[in-house]
Image (spheres, rainbow, N blue to C red):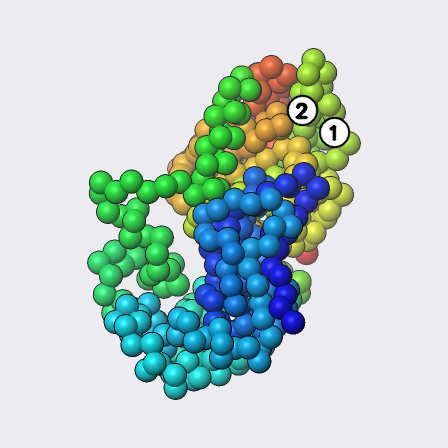
Amino acid sequence: MPTDVVMPQMGESIFEGTITKWLKKPGDKVQRDEPLFEISTDKVDAEIPAPATGVLQEIKVSEGNTVQVNTVVGVIGDANGASAAASTPAKPAAPPAPAVKEASAPAAPVPAPAASREKDDDESDVRSSPLVRKLAREHNIDLAQVTGTGTGGRVTKQDVLDFLAHRGSAPVAAPSTSAPGAPSKPGVGLGGPAAPPPPAAIPGDLVPMSQMRKIIAQRMIESRRTSAHVHCMFEVDMTRIVNLRNKLKNSFEQRHGARLTFMPFFVRAAIIALQQFPIVNASLEGDSIRYHKHVNAGIAVALDWGLIVPVLKGADELNFLGLQRGITDLGERARTKKLMPSDVEGSTFTITNPGQFGAVFGLPIINQPNAAIMGVGGITKQPMVVTDKDGSDSIAIRSVVHLTLGYDHRIIDGAIADQFMAAVKKTLETWSEDIS
């Protein structure tokens, strides 16, 4: 019996969604809970799983169209009806390059799809995204041999790249793509030789904005028009924390199964300062100021297709390990399109990290309705004047970061903003909290 595929309601305030990509074509076999299509709402981009096992018989709503929730967007038929559905467009056996040539002979590919489907059946037992499975096929990797580090043992793109690196075959596969715009960073671009790069790389092209990009553009303009943006910047000596992380990162990962990053240090320092200066954790509601009971930390995550700010709820009630695990989980789910609308709602303070790409500092735009956002620059070694306990000065090489606070001058005065940042600086430079 056919099963309708509907546009899901991703939250109480979500009434419509845009289909950005179908991950299957009519005639393709699908497994229940396997990612079937991708949607974009005004909150999140998400992969939507198949509601049943069978064959995708029909796509009723094509890519790029926006429909109301509960609209039927496709139909999945019984696996027994595969022959009828597959008789229309036969699935080519080879990757994208030869697909155009083989499409002209619909009868020929009959044996090849059988082999392809056998492989799909094997891969369906391993939790992974279509991008990961495509990457595995391109490099002839059995996903069952790859250890998944994602949520619930999910195999991520990085897992496949690490597997390739250990196997020593990563450089071999690169020449197989003859596209002129091959990525310059071999470890980063292996999984993405597909559609997105070429249009953006060709000068003179007019490329439509994605749904996410439209929403980002709208919200950034709204924030600029809403808040009276002012920025202040502080230089922070991170040497103590850098040394501590270098000393403990291996044992931390072995003990807790989580990689030790710098972000929880910045989040923890911000929480301590927010508790001292609650106005920085507040928001404006009409002519009144809402002082929030808890710190819900928005952590900006840069994606290949845009930017999103998942929220670590009740961050002030978490210990250091809880912060690290929460930040890692949100980042992983953001990159694999597993966030729910509730995961990006309710932030009271935001932290963004342009320094991961080499920026010395940034002047971030406030994430509404927050009153402030802290930007974290890159940690670099620099000569600094250091004052010893006896009051004498000397020059030493120190690990330094530049932190920027963007704040809404309607409710936060410059003196408060500077005192807040001074508190963040003090916590980081004199770090004494146990992280083990």
Residue 118, x across and y down, in percent: 48, 83
For disc 2, the marked residue is: 283
Q: Quadrant of residue 100?
A: bottom left
Residue 321, x across and y down, in percent: 68, 53
Asked whether 145 or 13 is in front, the reply is 13
Left-right relation of 86 to 78: left
Mark 2 and mark 1 residues within 8 Å of each other at the beta carbon: yes
Look at the picture and state if 131 lies above or below 300.
Answer: below
Residue 367, x across and y down, in percent: 56, 31
Kindly identify the amino acid type of the residue bearing the numbered disc 1: His
Please, what secondary structure does the residue beneath circle 2 have?
strand
Asked whether 190 or 273 is in front, the reply is 190
Please, what secondary structure does the residue beneath circle 1 have?
loop
For disc 1, the marked residue is: 292
Label 2 or label 1, whichever comes before in sequence order: 2
Residue 75, x across and y down, in percent: 57, 63
Q: Residue at x 29, y 40 (%)?
A: 206
Look at the picture and state if 107 lies above or below 303.
Answer: below
Q: Residue at x 70, y 51 (%)?
A: 322
Q: Quadrant of residue 184?
A: bottom left
Q: Confirm whether residue 157 shows in the render.
A: no
**Numbered label attached to residue 18:** none
Asked whether 19 or 236 is in front, the reply is 19
Look at the picture and state if 384 lies above or below 331.
Answer: above
Q: Residue at x 68, y 56 (%)?
A: 436
Q: Compute the Cα span from label 2 to label 1.
A: 8 Å
For the N terminus, which image quadrant? bottom right
Q: Quadrant of residue 433?
A: top right
Kindly identify the amino acid type of the residue bearing the numbered disc 2: Ser
